[in-house]
């Protein structure tokens, strides 16, 4: 990613598609697990990259070169998803029209079951668990992306996993 | 299988459409769609700045790449503009439609925005446009600016003619299209069609 940051600093328009290619999949599936909805995650992913592009366009090349791209992208993605989830909670819940497994884009087979389990976690726990184990960020990177200390992030992950285990045990 | 391993498997491929959506949303690619006009099917391209070009459908990809250097993706126009595009083409005025005129100089933008004020059914000589932009001697430069119009039909450069009554050249498919448009708008009476199209 350091090489990509350097390329973005040199020629943003030329290098930006590479950032989408490298990180798009992980950003999408992270957001998909955090917000629990395929279509909303697609919209949030697009918006994350569009905002990232605009932000990079306003940065000095030196600043871009020193960016840690993954945590930085996730700062934008989490901010958008927080606002989105807050707005959604203020609106009446729409009737779910799509039948499970009917979306055109492929989802893991037990996707809906994981959505139910993830919904049991607090937002901080869900975010930390997803960023660590679905997206694959390090504790330090999660700390940078969420603005929480490494110790708090570890505790969020630990409690989140314990909660998921307890939920899954109840299912059996 | 541990819960951590199960979580690691909770992803899949990047859904189709996201990469294109980002390219369109950032303006790294222009979207395009087809519209009807008095001279046949035209292609309109757009990006977050506004409508960036209007061109004849045949061979537009190559001309777009050469002039703008951006990728092209088939797309629906942004919802807020969608109804304004056919209106702008039919009326020959941008109205509230945003235009992306970054492909021309500031002077050329002034010329084009002045050209946009010529009402349907009327024509003006190049010299009139030059006077309106306070460069009365720059008639030739006005001619070049009009020829560089990236959004013909919407900025009605077909309404700018030579002072001797010849209709002059037209970038959108040649002078016969200019004649057809002026006939369609009822402003061809008394004008001379120069098949050579020399300005």
Image: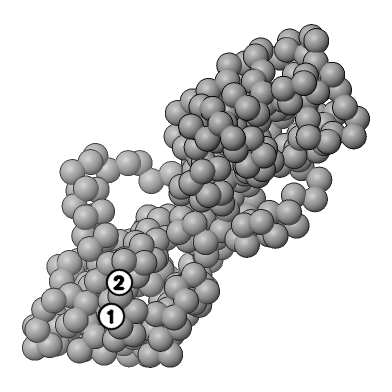
In the rendered structure, the residue with mark 1 lies on which chain?
A
Within-10-Å neighbours for mark 2: few <14, some 14–19, many 20+: few
Q: Nearer the viewer, residue A11 or B126?
A: B126
Q: Is residue B191 above or below residue B97?
A: above
Q: What secondary structure is marked by label 1?
A: helix
- Give the residue displayed 46% in from the left and 49% down from the top: B48
Identify the residue at horizontal 21%, vertical 48% (top origin): A87
Please state the horizontal and vertical placement of residue B159, each as a whole percent of the image.
67, 23
- Against B41, residue A59 (above or below) is below
Q: Residues within 10 Å of mark 1 (few under 14, many from 20)?
A: few
To which residue does mark 2 refer?
A59
Asked if residue B131 lies left or right of residue B1, the reply is: right
Percent of width and height locating residue B33: 65, 42
| B152 on left or right of A119 | right
Q: Is residue B27 above or below residue B8?
A: above
Left or right for A78, reference B124:
left
Where disc 2 sits, the SS reads: loop
Left or right: A51 in relation to B88: left
Residue B47 at what x, y percent from top left?
51, 49
Residue A19 versus residue B159: which sits nearer the camera?
B159
> What quarter of the picture does the C terminus of chain A occupy?
bottom left
For the point 65% across and 29% down, which residue is it?
B126
């Amino acid at each position: 990613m350091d090489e990509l940051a350097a390329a973005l600093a040199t020629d943003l328009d030329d290098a930006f598609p590479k950032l989408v290619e490298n990180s798009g999949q992980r950003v999408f599936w992270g957001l998909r697990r955090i917000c629990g909805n395929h279509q909303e995650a697609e919209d949030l992913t697009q918006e994350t990259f569009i905002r990232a592009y605009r932000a990079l366009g306003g940065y000095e090349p030196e600043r871009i070169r020193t960016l840690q791209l993954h945590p930085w992208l996730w700062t934008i993605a989490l901010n958008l998803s927080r606002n989105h989830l807050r707005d959604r909670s203020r609106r009446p819940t729409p009737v779910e029209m799509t039948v499970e497994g009917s979306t055109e884009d492929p989802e893991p087979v037990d996707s809906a079951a994981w959505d139910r389990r993830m919904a049991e976690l607090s937002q901080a726990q869900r975010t930390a668990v997803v960023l660590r184990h679905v997206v694959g960020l390090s504790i330090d990177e999660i700390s940078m992306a969420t603005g929480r200390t490494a110790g708090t992030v570890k505790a969020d992950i630990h409690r989140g996993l314990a909660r998921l285990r307890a939920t899954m045990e109840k299912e059996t | 299988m541990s819960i951590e391993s199960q979580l690691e498997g909770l992803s899949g491929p990047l859904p189709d459409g996201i990469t294109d959506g980002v390219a369109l949303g950032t303006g790294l690619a222009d979207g395009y769609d087809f519209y009807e006009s008095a001279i046949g099917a035209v292609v309109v391209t757009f990006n977050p700045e506004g409508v960036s070009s209007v061109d004849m459908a045949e061979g537009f990809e190559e001309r777009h790449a050469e002039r703008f250097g951006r990728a092209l993706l088939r797309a629906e126009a942004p919802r807020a503009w969608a109804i304004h595009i056919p209106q702008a083409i039919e009326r020959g005025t941008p109205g509230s439609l945003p235009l992306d005129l970054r492909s021309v100089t500031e002077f050329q933008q002034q010329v084009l925005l002045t050209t946009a004020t010529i009402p349907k059914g009327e024509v003006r000589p190049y010299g009139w446009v030059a006077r309106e932009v306070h460069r009365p001697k720059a008639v030739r430069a006005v001619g070049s600016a009009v020829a560089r119009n990236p959004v013909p039909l919407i900025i009605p450069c077909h309404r700018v003619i030579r002072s001797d009554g010849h209709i002059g050249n037209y970038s959108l498919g040649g002078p016969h299209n200019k004649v057809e448009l002026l006939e369609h708008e009822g402003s061809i009476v008394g004008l001379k069609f120069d098949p050579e199209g020399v300005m």
